[in-house]
Image (spheres, grey):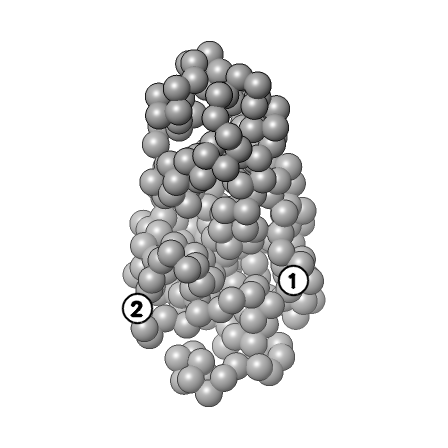
Amino acid sequence: MIRAVLFDFDGTLYDRDLALRRMAEEQFATFKSELGVNGPAFVSRLLALDDHGHGRPKHMHHKLAEELGFSPDLADRLEACFRSNYPAHCHPPDDCLSTLGKLREEGIKLGIITNGPVTWQMRKIEKTGVSPFFDTIVVSEAEGIQKPDPRIFARALERCGVEAGESIFVGDHPEADILGARNAGLLPVWKRKPYWEVPNDILRINQLSEVLSLVGLKSGLSGSEKKKV
């Protein structure tokens, strides 16, 4: 019996790539007279450097400045713009809040496990409006460990008062989320991304509402998916 559903945040409870694209478009609109490049070139290179958040270099906007030929001062202002405005672009998908609400109504414990700085992650989480649904929100900076370390999963489970064997973890990254959850004893569920792959035996979803099937709240699993559960 599933008693808890834990989630990754970035890329799982909101579309991180879409948020970053909208942020890049806003940056270009704000600074285009100083950038000296066209919009598509600026946006596409920024997204490529970010690499879905897992290959993002330090001082990304300064790296972008070196490649595209604008000044370090402008890179500083682009970074400040990003830090100020990005959380406002973090919108949960249409089925997110209703899915979390249904899980809570049924007494399922809910948690977030996310890597990153506390202040930054919590700003984004608050902007999405999901925080009231969760029994615990575990942020790596506060814990001193990060996914895929099994200990961070164990801490979330303890705070929810559940065991690993009665919990699932929904995430998008093959190593941090899927491998990490599996090694911690949870049932991993992959929120599909076209640019990553996971082992064939991993259960996968396209939409968050599909999680409801996994905890028996509605029908809809295919035969092959039922076998994987």
Which residue shows up at 49% across the image and 16% down it? 74
Q: Which residue is mark 2?
A: 199
> Does residue 10 appear to the left or right of 60 in the view shown?
right
- SS under mark 1: loop
> Does residue 94 appear to the left or right of 50 in the view shown?
right
Q: Which residue is mark 1?
A: 95
Seen from the viewer's position, the closer of residues 61 and 215 is: 61
> Does residue 168 appear to the left or right of 132 in the view shown?
left
Q: How would you rate the neighbour count of disc 1 (Cα within 10 Å): few for under 14, some for 14-19, many for 20 or more?
A: few
Q: Is residue 120 visible?
A: no
> Does residue 143 appear to the left or right of 101 in the view shown?
left
203, above or below 125, in the image: below
Seen from the viewer's position, the closer of residues 88 and 116 is: 88
Residue 85 position by quadrant: top right
Residue 132 percent across, percent down from the top left: 67, 49
18, above or below 45, in the image: below
Q: How would you rate the neighbour count of disc 2 (Cα within 10 Å): few for under 14, some for 14-19, many for 20 or more?
A: few
Q: Quadrant of the C terminus?
A: bottom left
Residue 45 percent across, percent down from the top left: 41, 36
Q: Amino acid at mark 1?
A: Asp
Seen from the viewer's position, the closer of residues 102 and 185 is: 102
Which residue shows up at 57% across the image and 35% down it? 25
Residue 125 percent across, percent down from the top left: 59, 43
Q: Earlier in the sequence, mark 1 or mark 2?
A: 1
